[in-house]
Image: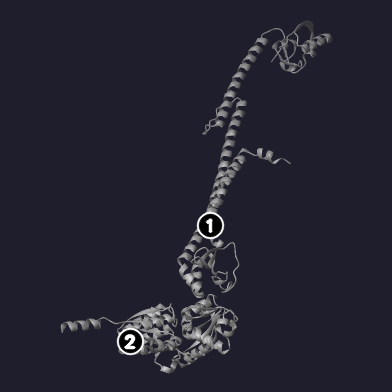
Amino acid sequence: MKLLFLLLLVAILHAREIRIGFTAVITREDTESIQALVEYLSKKTGFSFKPVFAKSYDEMDYFLAMGLVDLGYICGGPYVEGRERYGYRVLVVPLNFEGKPYYYSLVVARVEKPYRRLTDFAGKPYAFSDPKSNSGSLVPTYELLKRGIRVGDFFKPIVYTYSHYESLIAVHKGFVEGASVDSLVYEHAIRLDKNLQKELKVIERYGPYPTKPLVYRKGLDPSVVNRLRRAFISMKEEEEGKRILEALGISGFSTVEEDFYEPIRSMINYVKRNGAF
Amino acid sequence: MVPFKERLFSLSMGTKLSLTFLLVILCVSLPISYLSSHYSEHLLRNQINDSIVQSVKAEEGNIRTALLNRDYWRVYRHVEALASLKGIEYVAVLDENRFVVAHSLPQEYPIGTYYPENAEEEKVYIESFGKKLGMVIFRIDHAFLESSIMPLKFLSAGFTFLFATLGVSLGIFISLRISGRLKKILRMAEDAKEGKLYKVSFLEKDELQDFSDYLYRSFENINKLLENVRFEGEFFSSLLNSLEEMVFVLDREGRIVFVNRSVGDYGYSYHDLLGRRFICFLCDAGKRWEVRGAMRKREAINLEGQFRGRSKKLDVLIGLSQRKTF
């Protein structure tokens, strides 16, 4: 009996580790904000958190499928495609500064460049973030396809950076003429980097689209899921939580219905039907 | 127009010495400066070359994969990292057909631009099992090389200038010293003429000291000779003055250069007769003719004649003796 009690005590004291995966949807270079988030969550849930950075959405899908991460901050596009295949579910979604779970796909160029719209980049090097990204790949592909243009022939070439932030850097350095990026990442990036703010401009905005979800892997203990969800949702109600949210470029977390990502699903289907390359 | 060679030879000793120093320093220092700066530049260029080749080799696998996948952004990141190495002006990764995959100057060379050969660029091939997939080309920043070598050049120039200045100063110093010593020797000679003979000694025991000593000894000998001559002169003039007969010493032209005191007995003083022609004092023209002929022939003769005294003519016996050599 004493031994059983001792084992129970050790199990309670030994905090569970939650591995939280980050992808291109967040400015991964902002490690300070990410560290503040995991420390806050650790304090609120009692779990210890370990951030894991994936190079692409495919890699994150693999991590989620194999249980190498428990949570993954991914994009609407990969979520729509991976939900059935890998069995992950939405834990929470971030809210923009209007308190809504939407974001935009922005077309960005350098301020001195003459571009006015997405179609001006014909024959130019153009940055997509991840091939599976909604704002950084699917939206421009879909928008051009609606005009009868296939991106594979249109841009010369498409440069995949696998990060919205790096797409901004690629534009800033002049390696590409333009890029399609996530509006939340853009706003976060220009707040952190004043050079980007001065030297980049948004020339077109598509959306709003359902925002990128924080998903949990199949098989994660429901009590852990609930505890985590509560911690995320209650962040906006506390001063410390608000500060971290602001640093991350969002105003809070919320839950959404299952059909929330239907607009993205229909775009994917449209592109699949018509072919982008 | 004085020829250059003549002008050069007629320069002062100090100027020649300074020019020689300057020439020697420039002949030695300039080639050494030139060689050392070129050698350093060569070393630096090789070092930069090696560093980028090693960096490319270290990242070859990643570059190869990115190149094969046409992952332009990853390639650009490599290019950017290589371009940030010191001494590199730009770096580019080209595919096997020399089309730009990524260039560190992307606005000038966008993706897909054909990149012509440039002899000033270095290249490292990216290969897969011997097949060339592409290449990393780069150019060494000459401005960086220049600025890196500049301190060395300044140092060389500074030392050359310093040595040249020291050389010229040394030349001037030595020339001033030599001319000062020569002036001392000259003063010694001038004083010796006035009978003040003294020895000149210098700190340097060299040829000038030898010359000065030689000159001193020569003056000393001349003084001794002069003393002897003076003694002889005094002796002979005393001897001649002790005679009651008039004694005339003539030069080759027959001018009187010495007379003894006896001429005073005939109304003449020493200074009255000095420089005058002896034959003018002979009254008879025939006797004058005879004496002139004997003088021309350098013969000794004895004859009787009349000598023109100041107040009266005197019958005298004239003896003319000739000294053969002086």
> How many angstroms separate mark 1 from mark 2 (CA)?
64 Å
Instruction: Identify the residue at image location x=32%, y=85%.
Output: A44
From the top left corner, tell me how far across and down residue B29 is, in percent. Answer: 55, 47
Dividing the picture into quadrants, the one containing residue A256 is bottom left
Q: Position of residue B46 (x, y in %)?
A: 51, 58
Identify the residue at image location x=51%, y=61%. Answer: B49
Relative side of B243 to B290, left or right: left
Identify the residue at image location x=43%, y=81%.
A58
Residue occupying image coordinates x 62% and y 41%: B15
| Residue B152 in sight | yes
Amino acid type assigned to the residue bearing label 2 in the image:
Leu
Q: Give the residue number, with chain letter if any, for mark 1.
A: B149
Q: Chain of mark 2?
A: A
* Residue B214 drawn above or below residue B281: below
Q: Which image quarter is the N terminus of chain B in?
A: top right
Q: Quadrant of residue B14?
A: top right
* Front position in the image: B266 or B319: B319
Secondary-structure class at tag 1: helix
Q: Which mark is residue A220?
A: 2
Subunit that carries the residue with mark 1: B
A211 or B283, nearer to the observer: A211
